[in-house]
Amino acid sequence: MIKAKKKFGQNFLKDEIVLDKIIQSMPNDNLIVVEIGPGLGDLTKKLLQHKKVVAFEIDDELCKILRTKFSSEIEKSVLELKCIDVLQHWREKNLLDSSYNLVANLPYYIATKIVLNLIKDNNCQNLIAMLQKEVAYKFCANVGDKEYGALSIFAELIGKRSIVCNVSPKSFTPEPKVTSSVLKIEKQRRLIGDIFKSDKELFKFEQFLKEAFKSPRKTLRKNLSPFPKEVIEAIFTKLQINSNTRPHQLSSLKYLNIFNIITDLTHFEDA
Ligand code: SAM
């Protein structure tokens, strides 16, 4: 019996009901499924009943087990197993060169980074991912919710967000310390292409949001003080934003509006 490695965030999902809920929530299309962290292959096995799968696994010991377990699927090319750190792969090339859906029980220590990468990756059409509950709810939060922040804004800008189900620690071996949730994002727009012109513009928007949410309890106006005061005042007047507004009280579209005006009126890098 293999010993789960904490450093790789290994909590294996053993609950058949939850596994089936994940499978039922998948979009009804013919796209390849990418799975990050197949682990012992319980989810992979179910995915392979419906789809072609490309799976990324960092742990050599698990890769050996998976190669044996799925030897016939690998031979028939319905499963491609890539034994590599997915983030390293992503830094060097596309996760996949064609359109795909992501379905995975993610390693929590890098889950936020992975979901953000998926949101930015135009090849990813939809994602269904198990995450720590608090993080999943941040991606799903709506304007006015206390969890509403940069993660919610990025997810909201590209499509429809929902929670498929919440999952008790008891559904995993070993049990994680936290409750989990399955997050679903159905993409309706491309972040680069439909919303931002380039990677550079997207990067600037990320910087802008960092400033906007720097101190969530302070007013947005105060958080935006690194930008020229007269510009911020003109924007608040033009967009009829109350000066006491807190960062979580403005919609993603309003943030885009403010960002576009600031970029038009200032040299953003000077902020
Ligand atoms: N999918 C399996 C399941 O549901 O039981 C395992 C999920 S477990 C939470 C996370 C998996 O991600 C582990 O198999 C772990 O080895 C793998 N993993 C962790 N870091 C990774 C990385 N950087 N790249 C690829 N896989 C990674």
Image (tube, rainbow, N blue to C red):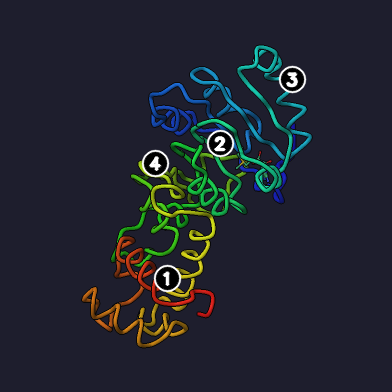
Q: Quote the CA–CA distance across marks 4 and 2.
A: 26 Å
Q: Which residue is mark 2?
A: 13
Q: Nearer the viewer, residue 147 or 97?
A: 97
Mark carried by residue 130: none
Mark carried by residue 187: 4
Q: Quote the CA–CA distance across marks 3 and 1.
A: 54 Å
In the image, 132: left or right of 66? Answer: left
First of labels 4, 2 by sequence position: 2
Q: Callout 3, which amino acid?
A: Thr
Q: Quote the CA–CA distance across marks 3 and 4.
A: 35 Å
Mark carried by residue 263: 1
Location of residue 20 in the rendering, given as x and y in whole percent from the top left corner: 44, 27
* Residue drawn at the location 49% of the way across and 60% of the way down: 201
Mark 1 CB near ligand 1 (8 Å cut): no
Mark 1: secondary structure:
helix
Badge 3 crowding class, 10 Å Cα cut-off, few under 14, some 14 to 19, many 20 or more, is: few
Q: Are marks 3 and 1 in contact (CB under 8 Å)?
A: no
Q: Are marks 3 and 4 in contact (CB under 8 Å)?
A: no
Foreground tag (3 vs 4): 4
Q: Nearer the viewer, residue 255 or 167?
A: 255
Location of residue 113 with respect to 234 vertically, above or below:
above
Q: Which residue is mark 3?
A: 68
